[in-house]
Image (tube, helix red, strand yellow):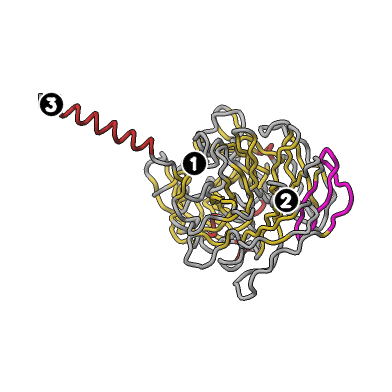
Amino acid sequence: MKTLKSKVTFLITALVITLNTWAQEPTYTNPVLGGDYPDPSVVRVGDDYYLTHSSFDYYPGLLVWHSKDLIHWERISHALNEYVGSVWAPDLVYVNGKFYIYFPAGGTNWVVVADSPEGPWSEPIDLKLSGFIDPGHVLDAEGNRYLYLSRGYVVKLTADGLATDGEPVFNYDGWQFPKEWSTECFCLESPKSTVKDGWYYLTTAEGGTAGPATAHMVVSARAKSPYGPFENSPYNPVVHTKDRSEQWWNQGHGTLVEDTGGQWWMMYHGYEKYFWTLGRQMLMLPIEWTADGWFKVPDNILAEDQLPAPAGKPAMSNPGLSDDFAHDELGLQWQFFKRYKPERAKVEKGELIFQAEGKSFDDSSPLLVNAGDRKYEIQVEFTLREGATGGLCLYYNEAGNMHITVNEKNFSVYNRGKRKISVPNELGNHGYLRILNDENEVSFYFSANGENWERVERSIEASGFNHNVFGEFLSLRAGLIAFGEGDVTYDNFIYKKLD
């Protein structure tokens, strides 16, 4: 009897805990996407959300994501498979049953279009708009189409959205923030449009993306016409890092979206304090509309808070960065840097065959994934063929990188192009490599079996691999190397977040 009573008590307690769990309001914490996903642009179509962001010199470019709740995202396509230059802030929109992405690259502005966000996407179309960046699409009440542009300009588009219809005209001065604020520049950019209740809301960024922690910000203005005149919001700046003590620095570049429950949100980016190497990560904050028709972040809310989650059906998040190469082609997490040569990477029989390029690491483009954690490790199984050199790298750009290489003679560790140490290769042409990044302290390992590891050296401090040092808005990404002759076969690439 005592045992039965205990079982009943246990079942009742378990039921109460379950009901309380179901009753609890779901929450989230930033970042929504950890790693370098700057300048986000999101659109909702029915119950589905689609997202893209800057891809810079990583190709294939313009990675497109899908979500049901704005929190859990999965990669679904690349919209750009032709190198046209460094791709900056894009705008993803849905108009008349088609998806469009407007983006700047190579000194001009482009558009790609598709019937489905999964693709196939069109070849990039040059809009012949030089001297501007960060296009933002606008649709007026009559169905006319426009692009907002940097520096406060707007240009009309043709009905199909694939060409301009006239010359850009100036329509917005921006909002003058107090001169005593610590910023990088005025830098009026990233104009994005929201049309609501007869108003055209223009959401822009000011203050500069990099530099001081308090530089970047989100600014709002509104008008009754896409051409203005615009009045600035009394709640400016809508988002801004006020002090270096905050967790998220350089917060800016916002895009508004309404969820399926009628709540509004701002997707934007920011650097995590002391972790510039992770790039500008994707953040989200709730938005409320005021009685006088403006929007703002609710009072006393910070990006570092635990916050109520958006409406929507939770879905599986993206499958991570690991790859066992079991499919017929590379996963969507992989990108080349600048020299886009997809023919170098072939997936066959559950392995990646990576063709060597160049005589040294400096002559070869790595194959990279977007690392998004303070502490993580990567490892891979390698087989060298025909005199090739393989390896693992952490890569910011051509000048800022570190890697471990393996050839028939040595395991070697390099930092910024200089060899730090070499040890004899006693494993032959097959083995395992590993890099541990422990909050910007990096160490390198090799193994005969993937279980017992020998450390080469732990001597590289990586916090200086950032835009203020190297002058490009990138991040320290992880990936694979192949140079010399022949190719390197890789299997079971593992990216693992560590506590």
Q: Is residue 294 visible?
A: yes
Mark found first going from the N terminus, 1 or 2: 2
Q: Exactly how many numbered labels are in the figure? A: 3
**Of 290 and 210, the residue lying toward us:** 290
What residue is pinned by disc 3?
Answer: 3
Q: Position of residue 83 (x, y in %)?
A: 74, 45
Give the Cα separation between the discs numbered 1 and 2: 51 Å
> Outermost residue toward the bottom?
180
Mark found first going from the N terminus, 2 or 3: 3
Query: Please, what is the three-letter code of the amino acid marked with disc 3?
Result: Thr
- Do labels 3 and 1 touch, CB within 8 Å? no
The residue lying at 71 percent from left, 38 percent from top is 94
Q: Position of residue 152 (x, y in %)?
A: 77, 60
Q: Position of residue 414 (x, y in %)?
A: 54, 57
Q: Which mark is residue 56?
A: none
What residue is pinned by disc 2?
Answer: 200
Give the Cα separation between the discs numbered 2 and 3: 68 Å
Give the Cα separation between the discs numbered 3 and 1: 52 Å
The residue lying at 51 percent from left, 62 percent from top is 463
Mark found first going from the N terminus, 3 or 1: 3
What residue is pinned by disc 1?
Answer: 380
**Of 404 and 209, the residue lying toward us:** 209
Query: Please, what is the three-letter code of the amino acid marked with disc 2?
Result: Tyr
**Where on the picture, by quarter, is residue 238?**
bottom right
Query: Please, what is the three-letter code of the amino acid marked with disc 1?
Result: Val
Residue neighbourhood size for the residue with mark 1, other residues' Cα within 10 Å, grouped as few (<14), some (14–19), many (≥20): many
The residue lying at 80 percent from left, 47 percent from top is 146
Residue range highlighted in magenta: 146-169
